[in-house]
Amino acid sequence: MIRHHPDQNLLLEYASGSLARGPSLVIAAHVQLCAACRRQYHALNSLGGSILKQSPTQPLQAGAFEQVMGRIDQVPGRIAGRRETPPPPAPDATLADIPPVLGRLLAQNVPLRWKKITRSLQICRLRTGQKHYEVAFHRLCSGGEMVEHDHRGSELAVVLHGSFSDHFGVYNRGDFILRQPGQVHRPIATQDQACVCFSAVSAPVAVTGISGWLLNPLIPFRPG
């Protein structure tokens, strides 16, 4: 059961198309997994359509329709009723049955390149065509722990496989996570299976404690 959701302000930004591409991908993945947020998203779209109908009309410039359609094709998972491209065969079991919006992203990043960060953690950074957020899969082995860390910017994430816990609660498949500077935590995966999350971060994390003095300057940040 999905218990953690984006707030209505984030859903409204996503539905209106004003959210940056990195966070939009995370919200789109959650919406495709969460029936409750999907209903809210459709309701917000309907409200926006009603407002547009009541707005005064303006003459269109030549080529405006083609420009709009081109932009729509670049927005992740936004058209209600549009048939999604099925994901390619998953490279491993932890990426099976991912949301269609991430299936398309995965197909654009084959072969996936996982990098071992610690004994417990692997990261696969993804190309998304933007320059403000680092977008990646994070895989924490069963029973694995991440180092305790703070955040220098916002982090949005959705659980795709398995589950983890931290100072703020327990997160299962489909759950949405938002972390901001000052929210120190240490994710720990459950003992029975690996946990995979999809995330977008606007700045590198900051390891807490004495080791942070040594490690923080070495933590990369690669938006793209």
Image (cartoon, rainbow, N blue to C red):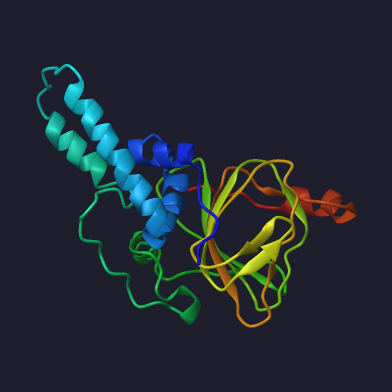
Q: Residue at x 39, y 74 (%)?
A: 97
Camera-side residue of 108 and 34: 34
Q: How many marks?
A: 0
Image x and y of residue 56, in percent: 17, 16
Camera-side residue of 174 and 110: 174
Quadrant in which residue 192 is drawn: bottom right
| 204 sits left or right of 197 in the view | right
Camera sees residue 82: yes
Image x and y of residue 18, in percent: 39, 34
Image x and y of residue 69, in percent: 18, 41
Camera sees residue 75: no
Image x and y of residue 142, in percent: 66, 79
Q: Residue at x 20, y 55 (%)?
A: 82
Query: Vertical placement of 210 versus 92: above or below?
Result: above
Query: Vertical placement of 207 versus 114: above or below?
Result: above
| 182 sits left or right of 104 in the view | right
Q: Residue at x 46, y 47 (%)?
A: 22
| 145 sits left or right of 163 in the view | right
